[in-house]
Image: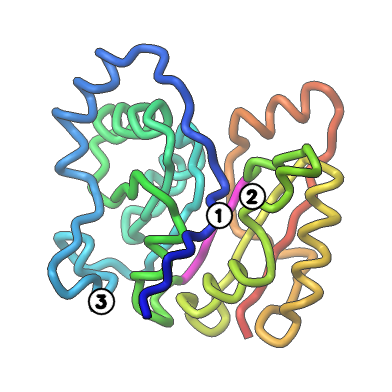
Amino acid sequence: MENKFKRIVSFARKRVRNKEKENKIIEDQFPKFKVNLNEDGIKAINEIFPQKFDSYILEIGFGSGENIIAQALDNPNKAFIGCEVYTSGVTSLLEGIEENKLENIRIWHDDAMDLVDMLPDNSLDLVYILHPDPWPKKRHNKRRLINEDSLRDISKKMKPGSKLLIITDHDDYASHITKAVDEVKDIFLREFDNYPAIVKTKYRLKADAIGVESEYFCLKQL
C-alpha cells in the first residue's frame, strides 16, 4: 500500500518581497544551475555536474549563500550542492554565482531531505547545516530539521570519515541537537576541533552582534 503520510517539513513558505525581480533571475539563471533529475534519479553524484570534481559537498539551508560562495571560490576543485526552499536565498546565490563566474555550484530549490533521499549512498565528503530554523515555540519543535531520523538519513549519503557540521545559536535547539546526537553515537563521532572551514552567515553575524554564542556540532562519519 502506498504511504500517504507526508514528512513534516522544517520550513514555512515566505512571502516574496520583490516577486518580479526574483522571478526574472530564476527564469534566466536557475535552469543552468539547478539539480537536474533524469528518469532513473541520481545514480552517481558526479552526474549533477558537467565535469568531475575531487569531492562533493552539500549545504542544507544556505540562506543568502555566503558560505557556499566563499567555499566554492576557495575550492574550485570541489563541487557544492546547495539546498534552499526560499526564493530570495536562491536568487541571492544565483547573483553570487554570476558575479564570481562559478561553475562548481548546483542548487536544489525544494525540501533538502527529498534530495538527500535521492543521493547515492557514500557520495558526500562534507555536509553543512548552518543555523537551521530553531522553531522555538514548543508546538513547532516537531518541525526542526535535526533529529535522530534525519541524522541517520544524512549519514547514509556520507563517505566514511566525512564530516557533518551543524551550528546553532539557539540554546534550546542546541539541547535538542545534543539529544539527537546522543542517539546516533553508533554512526557519528562528535569532534571538538578540526572543524570544516566556514564563513559567518548573516544569522551568525546577528548572533555575534548581540553577544550570543554559537554551538558547533562536528560529527565524523564512522
In the picture of the structure, the residue carrying the numbered disc 3 is 44
Where in the figure is residue 177, as x and y percent of width and height? Answer: 76, 59
Q: Secondary structure at mark 1?
A: loop
Mark 3 secondary-structure assignment: loop
Screen quadrant of the N terminus: bottom left
Label 1: few (<14), some or many (≥20) within 10 Å? few
State left or right for residue 196 relative to residue 98. Answer: right
Q: CA distance from mark 2 to mark 1?
A: 6 Å
**Residue at horizontal 76%, vertical 29%?**
207
Residue closer to the observer: 211 or 154: 154
Q: Which residue lies under the disc numbered 2?
A: 143
**Residue at image coords 36%, 75%:** 2
Is 196 included in the stretch rendered in magenta?
no
Question: Does label 3 or label 2 sit earlier along the sequence?
Answer: 3
Kind of residue at badge 3: Ala
Type of the residue with mark 2: Arg
Q: Going 77% across and 38% down the picture, which residue do you hit?
A: 136
Kindly check if marks 3 and 2 are in contact, taking CB atoms under 8 A apart as contact: no
Q: Is residue 125 above or below residue 95?
A: below
Say which residue label 1 marks. 8
**Measuring 26% from the left and 42% from the top, which residue is drawn there?**
102
> Dividing the picture into quarters, in which one does residue 219 lie?
bottom right
Q: Earlier in the sequence, mark 1 or mark 3?
A: 1
Range of magenta residues: 125-130
Residue 166, label in figure: none
Query: Which residue is situated farthest in the front direction here?
Result: 1
